[in-house]
Structure formats: structure tokens, C-alpha cells
Amino acid sequence: MWEDSSTTGDNEIHVFSGTPTVQYTNIQGGWSGTGNINLDPIFADTVHFYLDPSSPCIDAGNPDASYNDLEDPDRPGFARFPAMGTLRNDMGAYGGPGIAEWIITGIKEDTNLPNGNWPDQLELYQNFPNPFNPTTTIKYFLPTGGKVEIAIFNALGQRIKVWVNPYQEAGAHKVVWDGTTDSGQQAGSGLYFYRIRTGQHTIIRKMILLR
């Protein structure tokens, strides 16, 4: 309940009788109760109310396991988007066990952007240059805005690099990989796979790093 003031009239929530019990809620101005906070929620996107990774509302909801977020199958112990953080429930629109499953739709073969026309579906283009050393650019197109994850895997299927954007506008985007892992180590020569994952779609391609 943060900046929930109505455009006309007075407050939107009225208590006519009794005493409400409010717990694990972010209430502007404060409210007495277990787990309540009075902090800016820090939205990454104020249209869809996705929480920024720095939000104090992440992992601040009811700690009872029955309220846990769904687990990301690629990151055991961490929540599946649009929930954030670990498995503890978030305060906000998306915390808890009710968010949707990821659906992998398959691996897409190489395609190019046809005649400069924008596609009407998710696209992941071949990296350039390929083979590469030391950097390469990965371009992609989003038909609609939403969360985007770009990940790189080695030939053993181990994820070595990931970029996550809680909300990215529709359109053309790119990331540049400098050949390092998330831990800052130099990746060795060889075959790598790069993957884009959005709310319901996944595309995977391959590339070659030559040192």
C-alpha cells in the first residue's frame, strides 16, 4: 500500500468497524503489525509493478513455507520470475505460489531479420562476429515488453554468464559478451550456447570462442 491515493475523494480503504490485522505489508506512513515496513518499494517498472532487485519488499513477506514463491528450475533455492530473490514470499503483486510456469518452446534455427521489417515474435539473432575473440554482440528482438534473461552455457551445459532485466521495452536490443564468466574468469576456446528466455518462450543458439 504505497502511493495508493485515489484521484478523487479521500482514502481508498475505509475501516468502518473492528480492528484490522495487517502483517508483512509495506504501508506508506507505517502500520503496527508483524513484519510490516514503511519503505519505498523501488519498482523496476511502475506500469507492471515489477520489483527492482534492490527493493526492500523482496523476501520480506510471510515466512511460512505455504506462501513460498515457486522455485526457478535453473536456480534451485531462488524464486521464479516475476517473484524475486529466494523462495520466501515477496511483498507485492507477484510474490507467492500462484505465478505461472516457464514454457520452453524449443530451439530455433538461424534466421536473419527479413528486409528490415520488424518481426512479430521473439527473435534471437546469430552473434557477430562468430567465431570471435575477445568480444561478440548478441542481438535480439522483443515483440512485447517483459522480463528478459540472456544466458551463456558451456559445452557441458553449465551456465557461466547471465544477464537479467526485470523489465525491458519491446523492440531491438543487444548485449556484448567479453568472453568472461560471472565470476570474472576468462572462458576458454570452444563451443558455447546462448539462450534468451522471456515469460513463455526460449530460443537457443550456438557460437564459437577462439582464443
Image (cartoon, rainbow, N blue to C red):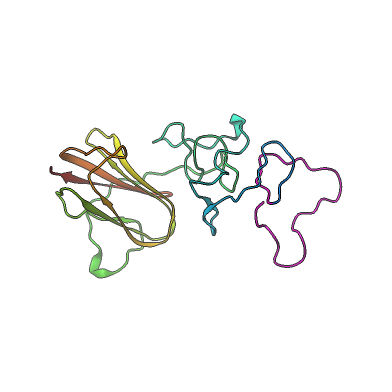
Residue in front for this viewpoint, 84 or 125: 84
Place of residue 154 in the rendered image (x, y in percent of width and height, measured from the top left): 24, 37
Q: Quadrant of residue 106?
A: top left
Q: Viewed as shown, does residue 90 lie left or right of 20?
A: left
Query: Picture quarter containing residue 170?
Result: bottom left
Q: Which residues are magenta?
A: 1-28
Quadrant placement of the C terminus: top left
Q: Is residue 10 above or below residue 1?
A: below
> Who's the residue at 50% across and 44% down the image?
100
Tell which residue pokes out farthest to the right in this image: 17
All told, the count of numbered labels is 0
**In which quarter of the view is residue 36 placed?**
top right
* Residue 157 pos. (x, y %): 27, 35
Q: Main secondary structure of the magenta part?
A: loop
Q: Is residue 22 magenta?
A: yes
Answer whether residue 26 is magenta in the image. Answer: yes
Rendered residue at 70%/60% (across/down): 5
Query: In percent of the image, x 19 and y 55: which residue is there?
Result: 128
Q: Residue lying farthest top? A: 65
Residue 203 pos. (x, y %)? 31, 48
In front of the other: 24 or 143: 24
Q: Position of residue 48 (x, y in %)?
A: 53, 56
Residue located at (22% from left, 39% from top): 186
